[in-house]
Amino acid sequence: MRLHEYQAKEVFSEAGIPTPDSKLAETVDEAVAAAEDVGYPCAIKAQVHVGGRGKAGGIKLVESEDEAREAAEDIIGMDLKGYHVDKVLVEAAVDFVNELYVGVTMDRGEGKPVAMVSTRGGVNIEEVAEEDPDAIAREHIDPSFGMQPYQARKAVYDAGVDQSIAGDVASILTTLYELWDDKDGSDAEINPLMVTGDDEVIAADAVMNVDSDALFRHPDLAEMEDEAADDDLEAKANEYGFDYVRLDGNVGIIGNGAGLVMTTLDLVDYYGGKPANFLDIGGGAKAERVANALDMVFSDENVDAVVFNIFGGITRGDEVANGINDALEQFDEIPKPVVVRLAGTKAEEGMEILNTDLVQVEATLEDAVQATVSLTEEVDQ
Amino acid sequence: MRLHEYQAKEVFSEAGIPTPDSKLAETVDEAVAAAEDVGYPCAIKAQVHVGGRGKAGGIKLVESEDEAREAAEDIIGMDLKGYHVDKVLVEAAVDFVNELYVGVTMDRGEGKPVAMVSTRGGVNIEEVAEEDPDAIAREHIDPSFGMQPYQARKAVYDAGVDQSIAGDVASILTTLYELWDDKDGSDAEINPLMVTGDDEVIAADAVMNVDSDALFRHPDLAEMEDEAADDDLEAKANEYGFDYVRLDGNVGIIGNGAGLVMTTLDLVDYYGGKPANFLDIGGGAKAERVANALDMVFSDENVDAVVFNIFGGITRGDEVANGINDALEQFDEIPKPVVVRLAGTKAEEGMEILNTDLVQVEATLEDAVQATVSLTEEVDQ
Amino acid sequence: MSVLVDDDTRVVVQGITGGEGKFHTEQMMEYGTNVVAGAVPGKGGEEVAGVPVYDTVDQAVEAEDADASVVFVPPAFAADACFEALDTDLDLVVAITEGIPTQDMSKVYKRLGETDTHLIGPNCPGIITPGEAKLGILPGNIFSSGNVGLVSRSGTLTYQVVDNLTDRGLGQSTAIGIGGDPIIGTDFIDALELFEEDPDTHAVVMCGEIGGEDEEEAARYIGEYMDTPVVGFIAGRTAPPGKRMGHAGAIVSGSGTGTAESKISALEDNGAPVGDTPEEVVDHIEDLL
Amino acid sequence: MSVLVDDDTRVVVQGITGGEGKFHTEQMMEYGTNVVAGAVPGKGGEEVAGVPVYDTVDQAVEAEDADASVVFVPPAFAADACFEALDTDLDLVVAITEGIPTQDMSKVYKRLGETDTHLIGPNCPGIITPGEAKLGILPGNIFSSGNVGLVSRSGTLTYQVVDNLTDRGLGQSTAIGIGGDPIIGTDFIDALELFEEDPDTHAVVMCGEIGGEDEEEAARYIGEYMDTPVVGFIAGRTAPPGKRMGHAGAIVSGSGTGTAESKISALEDNGAPVGDTPEEVVDHIEDLL
């Protein structure tokens, strides 16, 4: 779960990390009032979960009330890469001489946190990481001990940060690690961490992603979550609690377990079809989830046919079959043809239950995928 | 540094460990008012750093206002094993069916903390540990991870605590460990942890010793320290910052470094003398500390002669010699004969500086000790 | 004829009194697994499916001489359960629980490195030695005894491949579902090492997926150390970069590594053929046996 | 002809810019110790006693190829300095600092066990190989080169015994002051093991004191594993039970172990004679050489 910039800045600022003066605004008038308040020049920044907001027109620097109004009118309500902007952060511009990067994330390969510092802040850090890996100092943290004070200093000095601000940057990195640790962060980043002419260090942006699996122990953060996803289908998937990714093909795909669903996508591709989506209904799915999954895929106008592939472990074939029957029996006419393949726990029972007037049943994964691809080809003709 | 019972209970209670209703009182009237407040029966407990307060008459259970007044009159102002009682804790009596012990301390041999639980609370736990070590369940804690929740449960179940209260006791042990950890405890104990007929668990006593070396990061606890030592010499040693132990002999002993001072004591004994004290002036001692040390030993009326044994490493012989000269030159008559032996850093310079009209100088430790013991024998005759 | 678990494995189930714990204990016992105890704090003295329950893992192990545990404890308490199991010096801990916070697992992983215990999972289907024992939630009926080892990051994909193997008469020595979480105990290399040492495993199927670099590292291990032939399968060839598909393992970073292409070519370069479909995996295995 | 340190030891001083750090760096260099760098955050680029200072130990080690460090950092920051040194893979870290909180040292001790580094101290005088190098605050002039190893919990008592040895013409191979704190890195057994392996140490003096059970354990080690003769000395025979004398090490619990009697008889029972006085220690050494 990702915090908005304004939320992350609030969290960082409370922990003692310096951030620019700023105010949140939801209307143009509020934004203009906020700009007058924080003073010019200031930036008006769209609060949406989209990367590259600046380039996409979601951040504007303004020097006067008129400019502020114009920018706020442009940004509030705009559609930014499919997301609707309904909040902006109005923030005092920082007169910087240097931009740094500091971040903390989990290094999955090592199974331990890593703290990172670079003097090449203000740009896409992934690109820096690829082009010039040595430009980012990395310090792995032993999760049992937590970050030792020397490690923050080491990362800062190794990155080549100036001695005059090294202590302050190390202390910000320490705070960032503590936040990451306390709040179950998956990533916590400041990019850029701006350095002013008189050696002040200020977090000009703030990223805080929180491990969704850990939200149960952070009710304060869970409250900050907002469903700003504008894509209707993704919003629906979120609501249903599905792992769903929309793609640009026409074969709807439903299955249980990420590996198996990906394999189904791959087979669709292998047999000449184009996957319309990834939809994992998860383990132990009951009838209602099955119906919801079908609803999702039927709602996608690009889908021409659906393959429903279940290999039961915890999930029971009979329950899936009942769910499919129930869902499809509601329709006068089935919206898209559905090919079903059930295997594993209670698969035989499931096969018997399935109403073959409503669905086409196949015995193997390969057959099911081939049949579905054929159906879409028929539609295409 | 040891907290008083009332201070430890305040700390424990703030952290959520149940303690009986209680009030602190400094006068008899306050104590009686407090007793009326918490209700009868209640206990009036002397707040001094002395073990076995109950047996020594420092704790009395009272059932009425008259008894409360009588007990308060007895206890407030009493001398308890050399300590003057000026505060009492008036505490509601707990109607218990069982007494447990829970504690956390540092196991020096293992270099890690250990959590302990026993169903044999309410008695001297050291005696239990010696007579029946298995009656105390011990769970070592990895200091990098801290106590895992299962460890608290394991200690509690291993000790044989009843299932009906096991969860509560485990949660108290967890809190106790966290306090020990947060406050740099050396020992944290609840003995007894009382169990009532309806399975309530209440800390009827509270011990919290804090690592003096860590007080710099606990200003709140440092403020709780009070100098209640009634022994004038020990109070003085505390004020001067010496490691000092008073013994019952007549040979005053001053030296640098615990091992060397202990060895000097042993040699005094070996050569037939009786040490009057252990006094370690520490490393790098300057002239003022030297003078203070002499002042300490001269103040002890039991002392007949003093051996001053310095082996310089950080401590410099010339500075010690100057300190001895300065201190002794203030006297018209030297109160007790002083034998000095200097070795190590700047020892030769020191030997030259020493005013041999005021002190007897010896070249070796053995000679110095033998000479001092002889001097006390002369006095004895 | 197996790796890590067999007829003699004595299992304690952590969280045996919960719904999942109870159901799968019954399933495991039905399959023939030697479940000897349960461990649930506060439930000591009870019985589940005829198995005695203890308050702590230590007591369960002491009383019933268990050497392995299966963790069905809810995510908020699962890391603690893993610590308890690891500190009890078991040979094997299988953590089924899905949704354990990653930072918790990072600590468990550190502790794991301080022990000699094998941890499988979390968020995994478990391990099975067909005909002998299963620890976890795998559907026993699709497995058959034989000489093909299987290691997989994905649960249902494992079942799919096993089904294809069994259909074609190729039994399995042991199948290990290592789980798809960001931080797991036993990884591909650990499992491959075990299969390499097992005289009764004659070939290994390794099912990977996009994301991370575990498959690439495993490929290098295969090239350098393995005599037993390995056949690979990589799920997620068609996943677009930057999209998270299902569990955390399934994400492509967009750079050179972590993609299906990178994993497939790493495997092939190290002598492990990769099947385009599960059926093709079985074809390769047939060729190699 | 030495243990842990010699002419080739390349030393970085942590806290070199402080008063103590600077003074003892000069003293060490005067003695001939190869001090190659200092490490103090924020002081990188400076020089102390002609030695370059770096911001981190890692940079100091990289630039100057150091393999040992001496810690003169104030107690509040000393544990962090130890972590930094231990994480830099040095062969030896000598922590002089007195007054490090015990819980901090407990964590350092855990980390120490995860490395191959020797940590001496904290709250110790350091280590010296006479005529070659000293790391710490020991007064170099009382030592002389020879074949007696010395390990001691107490600083000034070490000096006393060394003085007596040198007076009687018995030089030392290496002397190690392990420190008197509740938790220390190198303990008696570690030091005895090093001396046992050193062909040029022909006898060892072990100075213990009351409190703890380290001397008893060391005695058992001597009896079981050592060919090199050991002579013991135990300070605190006259200390009354329950009294804390000076540093934390010097306390008698009152029970059977930890007393001077217990330690002395453990040593004697394991073939290590114990001197009643420092002079008697030297007598025993003379007999044994």
Image: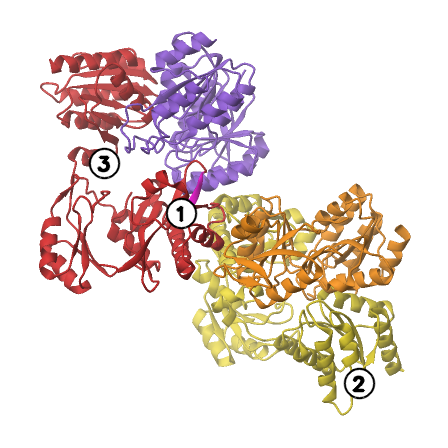
Chain colours: A yellow, B red, C orange, D purple
- Same chain for the residues at labels 1 and 2, yes or no? no
For image coordinates 45% across by 69% down, the residue present is: A39
Q: Residue B116, labelled with which disc?
A: 1
Secondary structure state at the residue bearing disc 1: strand
Dividing the picture into quadrants, the one containing residue A121 is bottom right
Q: Alpha-carbon neighbours of circle 3 within 10 Å: few (<14), some, or many (≥20)?
A: some
Q: Alpha-carbon neighbours of circle 2 within 10 Å: few (<14), some, or many (≥20)?
A: some
Badge 2 is on which residue? A358
**Residue D192, placed above or below residue C282:** above
Dominant secondary structure (helix, strand or loop) of the stretch shown in magenta = strand
Real-space CA distance between mark 3 and mark 2, rounded to the nearest whole angstrom: 91 Å
Give the image location of residue C228, x and y in percent. 82, 46
Residue A94 as seen in the image, left or right of residue B313 = right
Give the image location of residue A361, x and y in percent. 83, 78
Identify the chain of the residue marked 3, using the numbered disc in the image: B
Identify the chain of the residue marked 1, using the numbered disc in the image: B
Which amino acid, mark 2?
Leu
The magenta segment: B111-115
Secondary structure state at the residue bearing disc 3: helix
Closest to the camera, between mark 3 and mark 2, is: 2
Secondary structure state at the residue bearing disc 2: loop
Q: Is-magenta flag for residue B263?
A: no
Residue B214 as seen in the image, left or right of residue C67 = left
Real-space CA distance between mark 1 and mark 2, rounded to the nearest whole angstrom: 66 Å
**Residue C164, placed above or below residue A82:** above
Asked whether C254 or A377 is in front, the reply is: A377
Q: Quadrant of the N terminus of chain D?
A: top right
Badge 3 is on which residue? B238
